[in-house]
Image: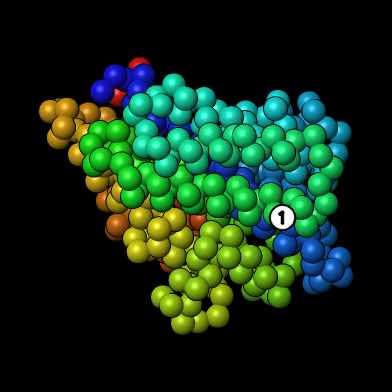
């Protein structure tokens, strides 16, 4: 396969996954913003949290004067100036798909091209909260349909392996950022950890990563931060967990290496992180600092992305 084709497949899947992440972050912010202002005596900061998790605060400040629902939703959903807005993700995914049309199945192309065409019906409109929520649901359906069409219709060859690697590395980054922002930013300093607001926020995070039912199936306990982190970091059975993402990465990078007859830095880094997650204990992670652990993971995940690009996509 040409490196250009591999690059387009890899980034097509990353942008499709990123659009889904942005929709989930904005949906979570809306749910938290719907709480009464007197709930737990809190000071609202869900929009700053959404921006910190999914946006570029420095770029945001060049475009908007204040952080509020309208500006953050516009920046993360529709801004053409934000290269990681939902609009930009779908447009870039479609451009990648168009460049490698013959490498995609009909179902994959129809999903991305149809999303790009339908996106136009949302642009330039002053959406009500209900309409914006419907838009976010639509974005999540697009991502699920694309992911499902890739899984169900692609040949199990290098095109498929690069697509799955892109999905896995993006999903791992997104899960880590959701956890880090909740732990470091979302709960106001005046609130008690383990209090009613803290419980509601963790519940919202679980729902937004489609893990609420899974949490209760696995732990059969009330929501506890340590167990939520255990599910989303170390549990390999949870599809969005860091451990699950790295199991997928190791599997597909190894298949690429076997197909091409050589291994390299990307296989080494992926295997190293999988082993690290496999031997980690969530209590020790919390004792040493969840924020520090996640920041280290994000850095190593970015290093893996750079290694994949250098080894296969340049």
Give x and y (percent) for residue 220: 46, 82
Instruction: Name which residue lies at 25% across and 40% down.
Output: 155
The total of numbered circles placed on residues is 1
**121 lies left or right of 269:** right
Give the image's coloring scheme.
Answer: rainbow
Instruction: Name which residue lies at 45% across and 29% down.
Output: 97
Give x and y (percent) for residue 208: 59, 60
Q: The C terminus appears in which quarter of the rendering?
A: top left
Instruction: Name which residue lies at 29% across and 19% down.
Output: 2
**67 lies left or right of 292:** right
Residue 144's place in the image compared with 34, above or below, is: above
Q: Nearer the viewer, residue 93 or 284?
A: 93
**Label 1 crowding class (10 Å Cα cut-off): few <14, some 14-19, many 20+?**
some
Q: Nearer the viewer, residue 300 or 1?
A: 1
Q: Is residue 153 visible?
A: yes
Residue that mark 1 sits on: 133
Give x and y (percent) for residue 154: 31, 41
Residue 192's place in the image compared with 78, above or below, is: below
Helix, strand or loop for disc 1: helix
Give x and y (percent) for residue 101: 41, 26
Q: Is residue 272 visible?
A: no
**272 lies left or right of 55:** left
Instruction: Name which residue lies at 83% across and 51% down.
Output: 128
Q: The N terminus appears in which quarter of the rendering?
A: top left
| Figure quadrant of residue 64 | top right
Q: Nearer the viewer, residue 138 or 57?
A: 138
């Amino acid at each position: 396969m040409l490196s250009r084709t591999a690059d387009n497949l890899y980034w097509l899947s990353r942008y499709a996954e990123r659009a889904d992440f942005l929709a989930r972050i904005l949906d979570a912010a809306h749910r938290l913003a719907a709480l009464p202002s007197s709930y737990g005596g809190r000071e609202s900061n869900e929009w700053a949290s959404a921006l910190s998790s999914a946006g570029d605060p420095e770029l945001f400040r060049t475009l908007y004067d204040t952080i509020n629902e309208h500006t953050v939703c516009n920046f993360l959903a529709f801004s053409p100036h934000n290269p990681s807005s939902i609009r930009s993700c779908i447009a870039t995914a479609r451009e990648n798909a168009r460049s490698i049309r013959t490498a995609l199945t009909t179902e994959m192309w129809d999903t991305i091209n149809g999303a790009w065409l339908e996106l136009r019906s949302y642009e330039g409109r002053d959406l009500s909260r209900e309409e914006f929520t419907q838009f976010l649901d639509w974005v999540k359906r697009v991502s699920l349909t694309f992911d499902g069409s890739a899984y169900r219709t692609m040949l199990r060859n290098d095109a498929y392996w690069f697509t799955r690697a892109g999905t896995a590395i993006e999903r791992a980054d997104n899960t880590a950022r959701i956890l880090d922002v909740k732990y470091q930013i979302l709960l106001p300093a005046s609130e008690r950890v383990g209090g009613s607001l803290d419980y509601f926020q963790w519940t919202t995070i679980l729902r937004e990563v489609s893990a609420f039912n899974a949490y209760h199936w696995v732990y059969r306990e009330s929501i506890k931060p340590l167990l939520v982190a255990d599910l989303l970091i170390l549990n390999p059975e949870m599809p969005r967990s860091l451990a699950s993402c790295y199991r997928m990465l190791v599997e597909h990078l190894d298949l690429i290496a076997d197909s091409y007859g050589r291994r390299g830095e990307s296989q080494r880094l992926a295997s190293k992180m999988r082993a690290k997650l496999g031997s980690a204990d969530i209590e020790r992670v919390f004792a040493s600092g969840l924020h520090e652990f996640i920041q280290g993971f994000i850095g190593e995940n970015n290093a893996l992305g750079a290694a994949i690009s250098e080894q296969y996509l340049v």
